[in-house]
Structures are given as C-alpha cells and as structure tokens.
Amino acid sequence: MLVRSTIQSLFEQVAAEQERKLATLSDDTRLIDCGLDSLSFAIIVARLEDHLGVDPFSSAETTDFPVTYGDFVRLYEGIAA
Amino acid sequence: MPRKPCPLREAIAAAGASAGRLYGVRGTTDLAGLAHGSSLGDQLEELRGRSVLIAVKDPSPAALALLELDGVAARLVLCPADLPPEHLPAVARAAGCDAAVVDSAAAVAGVAGIDCCVTVGPELLPAAVRRIGSHDTEWILLTSGTTGVPRLVRHDLATLTHALADARRGTAPIVWGTFYDIRRYGGLQILLRALLGGSLVPAAPGESVPEFLERARAARVTHVSGTPSHWRKVLMSGAAAAIAPHYVRLSGEIADQAVLDAVRATYPGAIVVHAFASTEAGVGFEVRDGRAGFPASLLDAPGAEVRLTVREGTLRIHSRGNAHGYLGEDVVAFPRGPDGAIDTGDLIEQRSGRCYFLGRRGGVINVGGLKVYPEEIEAVINAHPWVRMSLVRSRRSPITGAVVIADVVLADGKPGRARPSPEELTHQLLQGCRQSLAAYKVPATIRVVPGLEVSASGKLLRPNA
C-alpha cells in the first residue's frame, strides 16, 4: 500500500509542478491519458528511485513497458515486495 | 549564369509516376506532381541565389520547399519547429539570410535583413517554373550550443546523402515514418532516404503518439525511425500494435539493451537497427544484431568509407559525410582534429570486443534528444543566496534516456538570517529553475550534499569529464 500511495502522491506532485491536469487515476487509466508527458514520467521514475531505491525499468526481467496506471504500480510493487 | 544540376529534384522526377508520397497532417502530396507543379510557383525565381531561411512549422511544406530549392538557392537554413522564436534573428544574421519560406508571415516578422518572404502550403499547384539549377546549395543545419543559442552546421547534398547509397527504389514500396523533425540532422537523413526510395510520413509538431501511429497505419508504413525515447513512448502508448513495420530504426541517443529487447518483443517480425549519427560528424554506423553498443571491429577498419577511431576516450568519425564546419562566430569551435576526423564527444568503453557509450565528455546531458549543458543550470541554482556551489549531472532514465539531477552545497550560516530547511531550499531552487529554464532542463531531483570534489586547478570534478 505504501508503494501505491507514494506513486499516487508523486503523480500529483509532478503534475502540479509541470502545470498539467492529472486525470483521476484508476488501475485501468492508460498512462497516455493521465495528462502527463514523457518528461513528467521520467521525473516520477527518478524520484521513485530515490524514495524506493529501485528502478524496475532497468531490471533484466522488464521487457514489457507499462501501458496503464495499474501496470505501472504493479511494476514497482513487484520489485519492492 | 552557369547551369548546374538540381540533383535532389531530378532524382525524384526520374522515378516518374512511381515517385513516392509525402503524408502530411493536412493532406497527402504526390511527388510525381513536381513534374508539372510547384509549392512555390512564380516565387521560386525570387529565391534564386539567395540565402533562404526555411521557417515552416508544418514538415510537409518544408520538405517540398527543400526539394524545390536545392540547386536554386545559394543557402538553405533549416529551422526546426521547436526553434525558440527569439533565436531566429541571430540565426538569420549569422547565415546572411535575405529571404524566408514560411507558413505564417508572422514567423519572421521583425527579423532584420529579410526582404522576400514566401508563404507555402502543402499543395503542388500547376505552375510553369524554370527547373534550372544555378547554385551548389549549402544546407545549414542547427544544433544546440553551450549558451542555448543554436550553432549553424554547414552541409551540402553530397555530405547529406553520403550514407544513403542504399536508399534506392526497390521492388516493394517503402513507406517511412519518422518521429524526428525533418529539419534536424537525423530527420533530414530519413527525409532524403525516404523520398529517394519511396514515401514518408513525418510526425507533426504537437501530434500525439497514437495520432501519429494512426496516420502511419493508414499510410501502411514499412520502416519507422525515432530516438529510443520516442520508442519508449510508443511502447507505453497502448497503441504500438497500430503499426507492423518491417524495419525499426533507433538513433539520436544511446539505445540500451532494455529498449532494444522491448522493441523486438513488440515487433517480432521487424529488423531492429540502431544507428549513430551527429550533425557535425554525419552517420557513423548502424548495427543490426539487436545488441546494445557496436562491434569493436568497426574501429580502425582498413579501407572503410567511414573511418571510426577512439582517441582520448571519445569516438572520432572521418568520412565524406562529415559537415564542412560551423558558420559565424563559432567557426573555430568546430570539433575537427588535426587528422581530419570529427570528435563526437561521446565517450566509449570497450568490453569483450564490443564498444559501449558512456555518455558525453564535458557532461553534456541528452534528455529525450535535447542537449542540456550543466553549467547553464548550475548558474541558475548558484544564484540562490544559500547555495555555495552545485553540480548538475546526468542520471540514466528509462523514459527519456537521461534526466538532470543536481547536488547542492549550502553556504555557511550568516548571522541574523534563518537558514531554510533542505526541503524548503530544494523547493525554492526548483521554483527558480522552472521560472528561468525550459522544463527539460529543470532537475528531476535536487540533493543537499556536504561537499563536492574540486580538482587541483579549482574546477568541479564532473563525472565522465
């Protein structure tokens, strides 16, 4: 749950910083529809690495890039678990 | 006036009815129409022999103007769609521009020296134009410089098409799609490659990934090119399956194994190629084995058309695709060594017969294909009264290739002034950066650190420097 709430608050924080309107996030929200651009995602991933100590994208097992918000959260929950 | 060839337009005209198409957001242009039509019409003659600023936002009319003006204009200056308007006057002055091709006259309002401004659209209208070449047109490409003002890089059609010997019409129609801006070196390579051998769907400014993929699908793209960052966007768009390319090309940034594997898994039938090129050095190599880096056997290969060497840690390229130099005040900064090779500034490490890219010498950071000079950001951070010094560096990012991060050393406490907490300070610094820098230059994270390493000569020790 900690991972999920950390991710949720980072999405909100970065959306505010980048002056972007964040969509209501549910597991099936597609990342492309959530209102953030690539730079915003790059910032979120960098800060998650600081908070959680992991970057699941560079692990050898990851060849599927996340498409939905749920995919994104599970990617981190899978590593942090 | 000596009559010269217009090799670019003539190569396309030679294809006759089988010439390709240019798929724009405002319609499709059949290039066979260049035989009897023009996007410039009567005004083509007015541009003859001039130094012409191509400041067209929409890539399709820009491409048509380039096809028609090679061999006609003395100089073509290609402005990318995202060139900040405040840089236009300096670019026009450095290149001695006296004419412009635009899609909105407002684009060059207030730019000194331009006395002829032609507005173009994406259509080829019937026109009786003189298709006579008179000039060896110089092509000027823009690349980012240390201070944010672009550098002007001199090419001509021979240097630009040096790597395109294989871009000839085959039996199956080739339709290229590209995420690049066709006004930048990587995109221009794809434009020339595509139109010499088939058709092109260029991405339009502001177009989303699914919108572009839908246009690419409708045009039945066979070959698609972009940076690793573009491809990561495709993979995360949920729309990757809209296209089924035979050939996928990645260049412009380091292609790591993760992105190569993910692209391969998404398009199992495609040849996945990653290539190295720079505006100054031209095309270095392309690799088709699906592995990150490139084979060390490409270095110092005897008799190679493109001579690759590593000297002082960085990749050097010597070929007939090298640019001729910089234009204007930067002329002495052109990175050509005494042996004639261009220093790319990209650091190389060799491991077990393979060469890998480590990043840029001098710490230049590539964020999603955009160059960031750490010193520019440090200057903004260091302006804060509680900052003594800062170091801006790169962190690998799976999304944009790299992001910018900053380490900050605080100034000593001053009596009578409350020192902000690290959280308050980083908040203030981020706000300051956002006010004065483009979004991609603002650090993703800022850390307060006790100290930074400084060399004996008093310079900040930069990683990879």
Image (tube, rainbow, N blue to C red):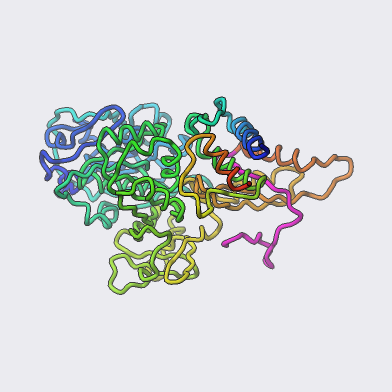
Residue B340 located left or right of residue B70: right
The verdict on residue B413 being magenta is: no
Instruction: Decide if residue B310 is in sight here.
Output: yes
Residue B357 located left or right of residue A50: left
Instruction: Decide if residue B98 is in sight here.
Output: no
The verdict on residue B458 being magenta is: yes
Image position, residue B337 (x, y; %): 42, 67
Q: Residue at x 67, y 65 (%)?
A: B455
Q: Which quadrant of the view contains residue B220?
A: top left
Report the front residue among A29 and A33. Answer: A29
Q: Residue furthest bottom?
A: B302
Task: Look at the picture and state if A79 lies above or below B302.
Answer: above
Report the front residue among B139 and A5. Answer: A5
Image position, residue B76 (x, y; %): 31, 44
Report the front residue among B23 and A65. Answer: A65
Image position, residue B402 (x, y; %): 53, 49
Q: Which quadrant of the view contains residue B62?
A: top left
Image position, residue B174 (x, y; %): 22, 44
Task: Look at the picture and state if B204 lies above or below B93.
Answer: above
Task: Look at the picture and state if B394 lies above or below A73.
Answer: below
Report the front residue among B212 and B27. Answer: B212
Q: Which residues are magenta?
A: B437-465
Main SS of the magenta part reads loop
Q: Residue at x 27, y 47 (%)?
A: B246
